[in-house]
Amino acid sequence: MAIELEVEGMTCQGCEEVVEKALEMADGTEEASADRYESAAEIEGDADPETLVSKVEMAGYEAST
């Protein structure tokens, strides 16, 4: 199942990598990709969307489902 999040505050490739790593730490995440140009992240797996938002926020970015 694919989950999409809106992610604000990414300005470079390093930001994308930080968000991806944060998302990959959530239980149930199989793969995560972030796109600073679209201000979005896509997650494959069965992770809880609220947990994913929390992981992104703990990494220093704003996120919503």
Image (spheres, rainbow, N blue to C red):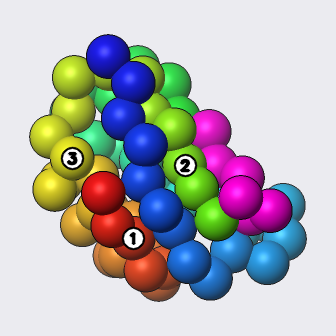
Q: Give the side of residue 21 with respect to residue 2, left or right.
A: right
> Would residue 46 be counted in the magenta stretch?
no
Q: Residues within 10 Å of mark 3 (few under 14, many from 20)?
A: some
Q: Which mark is residue 63?
A: 1
Q: CA distance from mark 1 to mark 2?
A: 9 Å
Depth check: give the residue in front, 49 or 30: 49
Disc 1 and disc 2 in contact, CB within 8 angstroms = yes
Depth check: give the residue in front, 42 or 30: 42
Q: Earlier in the sequence, mark 1 or mark 3?
A: 3
- Residue 15 vertical position relative to residue 35 in the rendered view, above or below: below
Disc 1 and disc 3 in contact, CB within 8 angstroms = no
Q: Give the side of residue 30 with respect to residue 36, left or right.
A: left
In the picture of the structure, the residue carrying the numbered disc 3 is 49
What amino acid type should be assigned to the residue bearing mark 2? Ala
Q: Earlier in the sequence, mark 1 or mark 2?
A: 2
- What residue is at 43 percent from the left and 80 percent from the top? 62
Q: Give the side of residue 51 with respect to residue 65, left or right.
A: left
Q: CA distance from mark 1 to mark 3?
A: 10 Å
Q: Earlier in the sequence, mark 3 or mark 2?
A: 2
Q: Position of residue 19 (x, y in %)?
A: 55, 59
Q: Give the residues in magenta.
A: 33-38
Depth check: give the residue in front, 59 or 37: 37
Q: Secondary structure at mark 1?
A: strand
Q: Which mark is residue 41?
A: 2
Report the quarter where the C terminus lies: bottom left
- Where on the picture, by quarter, is residue 13? bottom right
- What residue is at 16 percent from the left and 56 percent from the top? 50
What amino acid type should be assigned to the residue bearing mark 3? Pro
> Would residue 36 be counted in the magenta stretch?
yes
- What residue is at 35 percent from the left and 43 percent from the top? 25
Q: Position of residue 24 (x, y in %)?
A: 43, 39
